[in-house]
Image: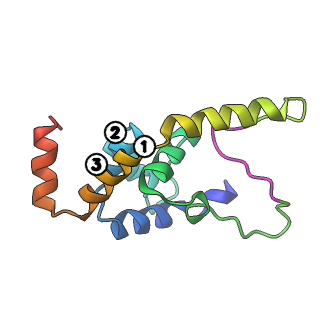
Amino acid sequence: MRYLQTFNRRLRQIREDGRLSRWDVAQMCGVEETRVRSWEATDARQRSYPSVTELLDFCMRTETPLENLLDLDEPGDGGQLELPGLAFSNSDDLSVAIKQLEQEINRVQLSEEEVELLRRFRNTSTENRRMILQILGG
């Protein structure tokens, strides 16, 4: 997966810069924490990759541009992007694929209130985060 060669390092850097734990990322993407750990694995044999839905969930909820996580600088790509979980053949209708992608983006799009809550949560102390999560039953 040439677009994801440095994904594990990029994800870890974005997560750490945003003061997010693996658990935080797992909650955003609707997966187990062990899955996020495998996304960040340094050993390629132990590494896995997120689905398009999980990748979009992370990008939307952290306001991270997709290109910050992917290796898009390879010459000769011609703008063609292949992601796990999002594939179609030449016989498939491109408009159907685009419509599915738009639906997925709309599903994970945060409201202004959610964005503000996430911003405040990310900027608070670790202790305050724990208390908030306890209140929410997490």
Q: Does residue 96 sit above or below 136 in this rendering?
A: above
Residue 70, quarter of the rendered image = bottom right
Q: Does residue 100 sit above or below 47 in this rendering?
A: above
Tell me, yes or no, whether the highlighted magenta stretch contains residue 131: no
Q: Which is nearer the N-term, disc 1 or disc 2?
A: 2
Q: Nearer the viewer, residue 2 or 86?
A: 86
Q: Residues within 10 Å of mark 3 (few under 14, many from 20)?
A: some
Q: Residue at x 43, y 50 (%)?
A: 61
> Tag 2: residue type?
Glu
Q: Which residue is mark 3?
A: 23
Judged from the image, the secondary structure of the residue bearing numbered disc 3 is helix
At which x and y percent is residue 134? 11, 41
Separation of marks 2 and 3 at Cα, in angstroms:
8 Å
At which x and y percent is residue 34? 34, 45
Discs 3/1, front: 1
Q: Are marks 1 and 2 in contact (CB under 8 Å)?
A: no
Q: Which residue is mark 2?
A: 32
